């Protein structure tokens, strides 16, 4: 009948009703996830600040170190108090003894498997790896002579002396290594352009290169392992096990 056909055509032509319930649920879920991410990142910032204060206090540092807590999500780490890795960076540290100081431009420490108390008053790390950067400018100050990179993992030291009123510039190259927790120099080779090496120069370099620079006083409980020279300076590798820090 015509009336039935009209109803059928109206039903086909009528637009389908949309169901906003699914879209609303999706929007709510996205908002909740965004808030959780924001809360997670805010929590990281607060925790990093507290950890930095703990490490500065426990290591008696002049300035607050930079602390980065790795891993995501962060809130699950807070609940357990266990952190797979915490990275710490401290700048401008002085090591050595009263008569032999050396400036460390930057010390980077990666603390592994760290357990931190809920109030951030103490922390325990199973192990740590680290490296310390020493610039040639700071090494020059410590040795009181000009130091630069000589290539092939060696350093170059320059010294000028007057012989019968004539200034003579001599150079010595040497390798570097760690012995007894101190920076030492090995295999010295002294040269003066086209001239014999004056006794005064030989004595100067012998005295200088036979000495060593203690690396005592490095913070965070890390121990010196090895050293390597490159165009940027010296990189000292360090390790540690079973570290505990208390505010």
Image: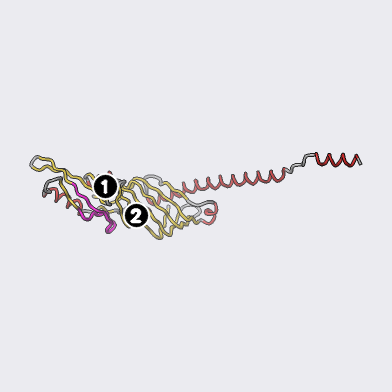
Queried whether the magenta region covers residue 187, the answer comes back as yes
The residue located at (42%, 46%) in the rendering is: 66
Q: Secondary structure at mark 2?
A: strand
Q: CA distance from mark 1 to mark 2?
A: 18 Å
Q: Nearer the viewer, mark 1 or mark 2?
A: 1
Is 2 left or right of 81, judged from the image as shown? right
Measuring from the top left, give residue 18's x and y in whole percent.
Answer: 74, 42
Does the residue at mark 1 contact the one at mark 2 (Cβ under 8 Å)?
A: no
Instruction: Name the residue at the right extreme.
Output: 1
Q: Quadrant of the N terminus?
A: top right
Residue at mark 2: 237
Queried whether the magenta region covers residue 176, the answer comes back as yes
The mark found on residue 18 in the picture is none
Q: Around disc 1, counting alpha carbons within 10 Å, would you say few (fewer than 14), some (14 to 19), or many (20 or more)?
A: some
Where does the magenta region start and end?
A: 171-188
Measuring from the top left, give residue 48's x and y in whole percent.
Answer: 47, 48
* Secondary structure mainly formed by the magenta segment: strand
Q: Secondary structure at mark 1?
A: strand
Going from the N terminus, do you reach mark 1 or mark 2 first? 1
The mark found on residue 149 in the picture is 1
């Amino acid at each position: 009948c015509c009336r039935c056909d009209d109803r059928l055509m109206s039903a086909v032509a009528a637009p389908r009703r949309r169901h906003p319930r699914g879209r609303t649920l999706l929007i709510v879920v996205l908002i909740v996830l965004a808030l959780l991410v924001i809360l997670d990142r805010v929590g990281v910032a607060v925790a990093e600040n507290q950890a930095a204060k703990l490490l500065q206090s426990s290591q008696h540092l002049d300035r607050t170190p930079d602390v980065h807590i790795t891993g995501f999500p962060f809130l699950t780490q807070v609940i357990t108090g266990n952190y797979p890795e915490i990275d710490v960076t401290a700048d401008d540290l002085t090591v050595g003894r009263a008569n032999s100081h050396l400036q460390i431009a930057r010390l980077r420490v990666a603390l592994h498997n760290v357990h931190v108390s809920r109030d951030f008053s103490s922390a325990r790390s199973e192990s740590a790896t680290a490296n310390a950067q020493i610039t040639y400018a700071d090494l020059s100050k410590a040795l009181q002579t000009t130091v630069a990179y000589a290539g092939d993992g060696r350093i170059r030291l320059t010294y000028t002396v007057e012989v019968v009123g004539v200034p003579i510039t001599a150079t010595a190259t040497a390798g570097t290594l760690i012995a007894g927790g101190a920076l030492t120099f090995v295999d010295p080779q002294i040269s003066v352009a086209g001239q014999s090496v004056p006794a005064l120069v030989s004595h100067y370099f012998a005295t200088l290169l036979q000495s060593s620079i203690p690396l005592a006083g490095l913070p965070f409980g890390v121990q010196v392992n090895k050293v390597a020279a490159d165009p940027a300076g010296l990189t000292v590798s360090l390790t540690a096990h079973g570290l505990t820090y208390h505010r």
